[in-house]
Image (spheres, grey):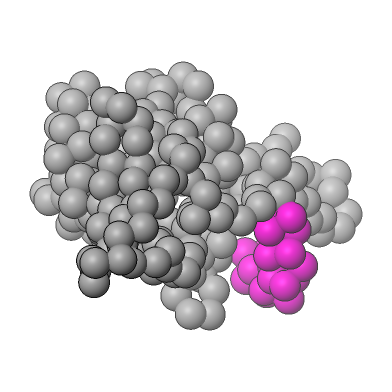
Amino acid sequence: MSSETLHRLPLPGGETLPYTLKRKKRMRHLYLYVKDGEVEVRCNPGVSLSAIESFLLSKEPWIRRKLRQMRPEHDPGESFPWDGRLIPLEFVEKADRKTLRFEYDPEKERAVLSGPSLPDAARIRELYEALYRHHAPEILNSAVERWSRVTGLVPTRVGYRRARSRWGSCSSQNALSLNTRLLICPLEIRDYVIVHELCHIRHKNHSGEFWNLVGQYLPDWKERRKRLREYERYLY
C-alpha cells in the first residue's frame, strides 16, 4: 500500500519548496531525490511530516544546487520569454533618447529594446516584467473565465502579481492570485495552473480527491506539471 501527495515547504524569506511525498510501508529509511526539476521524498507512513520537513530544511543548500544545475539561468539580454518561446532580443541604440523602451510585436514575433545603451540584466528583467504585468489581466482573465464555465468553480476575485516561489494560489475566501510570469509559459501550462487553483475552491489540500478533480478536466495533468518545472528558472 502506498500513497502520493504534493506538499509545499515554507522556507526562510517567504519562499516555498514544492515536493512530492511518497509513503510506502516497506521503506525503512527516508530517501530524497531531485530529478527532472522535481523534489521527491520517500519514506514509510510512520515518519511525521515535521520530521520530513526538518530533514528537507537541512538539505536545502544541496536541493537548491541540484535544481540550479537542472535549470540553467536565462540571459534576458539574449531573448524575451513569451508563451513558451524565447524571442531573440534586438537592441537599437538611440543616443538622443534618455530612457529605455521595450516593445514586443506578437504578429512579427519581434522584441525590440531601444535606448542610449544596453542596460544590465536586472533592468531588462524589469522591462519584461512591466509587459507581463500589463498583459496578464487580459490574457489570464479570459482563461479563468473559460475554465470556470467548464468546471463550475468560480473564484470570488482574481489578482495578478509577481511571485518568486509559486505560479498561483487560492485563498480560504476562494480568491485566486496568479503570477504575472505565467505569460512566459505556453497555453497548456497556463491552463494547468489555472485549473489547479480553481480546484482548490472545492478542495483546500492536495488530497486524492483534489487530484481526481484536476484529472477530470486535465487527464494529462502529471505531464503538464512536469513541464511546468522547466519554467521555474524564471521565478527569480
The secondary structure making up most of the magenta span is helix
Query: Would residue 171 be found to the left or right of residue 112 on screen?
Result: left
What residue do we see at 24% from left, 67% from top?
96
Query: Would residue 26 be found to the left or right of residue 47 on screen?
Result: right
Query: Would residue 109 be found to the left or right of residue 54 on screen?
Result: left
Query: Would residue 69 be found to the left or right of residue 114 on screen?
Result: right
Q: Which residue sits furthest front?
A: 96
Task: Residue 146: tell me if it is visible.
Answer: yes
Quadrant occupied by the N terminus: top right
Q: Judge whether 2 appears above or below 217 on screen.
A: below
Q: Judge whether 2 appears above or below 9 on screen.
A: above
Q: Nearer the viewer, residue 133 or 189?
A: 133
Please state the horizontal and vertical placement of residue 65, each as a whole percent of the image.
74, 64
What residue do we see at 64% from left, 40% from top?
3
What residue do we see at 23% from left, 39% from top?
140
Q: Which residue sits furthest right?
A: 28
The magenta segment is 48-69
Residue 124 figure quarter: bottom left
